[in-house]
Amino acid sequence: MGREGEVVAQLLPDFEKEHPGIRVQVQQIPWSAAHEKLLTAYVGDATPDIAMLGNTWVPEFVALDALEPLDSRVASSKDIVRSDYFQGIWDTNTVGNVTYGIPWYVDTRVIFYRSDLLAKAGCPQMPSTWASWRQCMVQLKSRMNDHQYPLLIPITEWPPIVILGLQAGSPLLRDDGRFGGFSQPQFMKAFDFYVQLFRDRLAPPFAGTEISNLYQEFERGNIAMYISGPWQIGEFSTRLPKDMQDKWMTAALPGVDGPGVSLAGGASLSLFRGSKHKAEAWQLMEFLSRPDVQVRFHQLTGDLPPRRAAWNDPVLSGNKYAAAFHEQLERAVPTPKVPEWEQIATKIFEHGERAVRGNQTAEQAMAALDRDVDRILEKRRWLMDQKALQ
Amino acid sequence: MAKLRIPSEANTAAWFFLAPSLALIGVFFFLPVVASLLLSITDFDIYGIANPSNTRFVGLDNYSRLLRTPDFWLALRNTFYFAFVGGPLTIAVSLGAALLLSSKLVRFKGFFRTIYFTPFVTTLVAVAIVWKYLYHTRYGLFNYGLGMIGIGPIDWLGDPHWAMPSIILMAVWKSFGYNMLIFIAGLQAIPEDLYDAAEIDGASAVRRFFSITLPMLAPTLVFVSVITMIGYFQLFAEPYVMTQGGPLRSTTSVVLLMYEEGFRWWRMGNAAAIAFVLFIVILLATLVQFRLQKERA
């Protein structure tokens, strides 16, 4: 899918050389169409042998009973060593303690920041607790004009809110994913912190659309910090001019009282139940999971590998911007593994937006969010009661 | 009295000739309509795809829940806002343009006709992206122009109050050319001697417009307003590309809501129910327009 679909074709000749007799056919689909296409393929009984799945899709395809459990294959594999994977990332691929996918590349959120601006404002290093982080933003703001903001968090994105919630210890959903847990104290604490950033004008109430050129704003010092993912390393390196290159840095996210968790995202390789070539397909998954192949994959795409062994390669260990991701990946946790998650995530930012824009108080917004989420999960509750699930 | 009897052979032959189109309409229109009507009384979703026994018949629950969902009413309100403000505005602008282009004083008519019609045939996604630049809060052309006359920057697409007007403005610009052409055709059908006679009687230009042009254009006007209204009730691509239904859902239309329910969340039962509600709304609006027209005539 997407760029990865193009690139994987370059890795395959080696695989076919090692395994004469196996021919791999790659079908590229753009990300935006992939989900629908795979669902349709499932309905039409035309699933591929292996597919790359966004790891938040795994629970959905497990609910469809479309994926093959992989635990016994992993246990007897030389190439796929479970303990070498970042725990949180592996965890996104398990539902009810059964593994349904092998992490292929990872995605987590860290902070990109202007090291020069932070230093001038009196924070030589990126703070590691919420309180000191906020203090640093206040100091930055005092040196800025009205159109400049210490932190950019697009209010139409759910990950920042969810990350703060996870940092505050919220399970997000309660009772085994039966109900929303957003008006519970842990999440409220995080949400208050989030909303207050906008109320105090430490972050602009912008949707993604108001920023036409993020790199320009960053270069002009209109934004000093930005929470984003690994793809931005490449973008920041090429889009910011040369003399800016030693003025930005990445850092793992702060947490309530010390380094905080972030989201375990990324994509996985999954084996479909309907496949007629499971043994061969598994060999390909093993090949793509080998540290040396993952390093090559990283060089081709910029995607970060899910295995610690691959991170020891100088290509990655020598990249100063990647170090924050390495650190953060050791503290990455999955989102709730219910098929309805994507829909719930959308509701989170919608209600977040209402509170940020001041139409509702934080309490009202979260109570309304729980009502919506409970309604979305109604079918799941019914199915769980029917014992159809698990 | 002679009885008209259609011989049965002719009957068979007629059916035979009609069969291909009937089959096509049946398979590709009536069958899907019936299927989605049935779908709308189930809770068919992703779990239902996994195992049909996970689908429940819920009767009219989808409809009654829809009526209790604030997002649905918001979407309906937005759609009405768009149709009842954008629709008349489009008609007024296209009528104005048509009158100007029909005037004997205007030169280069073909050139202007082409220019005004161009937006209509341009891909909507391309247009929407360019307009997004125009609407940009800091660097957009609109705010630049407003700034020159001392009006502060407007957050066109980011402010819940401005987002829908911005979408309407773009939609009017995009679609008035088509209606304009129809109006020009309608204007050309009005006999010139009516105007000559009125002028001799001393009727002013305004009077001539209201007493001759408008009544003579009435059939065209009905056609244009019905078509525009139906099209505008199906608002989808503009907000989908420009705002994704935001900010604060202020540009989420009924069709966009249906798309989200159906193809993003795969709650097909819900999506089908929304489709039928929209169908009823459009049907009612069209009936009302025809009734108003009849009363006037």
Image (cartoon, coloured by chain):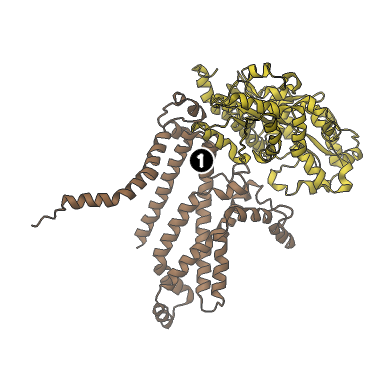
Under circle 1, the secondary element is: helix
Q: Position of residue A335 (x, y in %)?
A: 66, 26
Q: Amino acid at mark 1?
A: Met
Chain of the residue under the numbered disc 1 shown in the image: B
Q: Residue furthest left?
A: B1
Give the residue displayed 50% in from the left and 21% down from the top.
Answer: A382
Residue A335 visible somewhere in the drawing: no
| Residue A52 is at least partly visible in this image | yes
In the rendered structure, the answer to whether residue B211 lies left or right of residue B128 reads left
Determine whether A47 is above or below B213 in the image.
Answer: above
- The chain whose colour is yellow is A
Up-down relation of residue B218 to residue B53 (above or below): below
Between A90 and A135, the one lying in front of the other is A90
Give the image location of residue A88, x and y in percent. Answer: 72, 23
Indicate the position of residue B171 as horizontal and vertical percent values. Answer: 56, 56
Classify residue A61 by image quadrant: top right
Chain drawn in brown:
B
The quadrant in which the C terminus of chain B is found is bottom left
The furthest residue to the front:
A20
Residue marked by disc 1? B258
- Residue for point 42% across, 45% down: B279
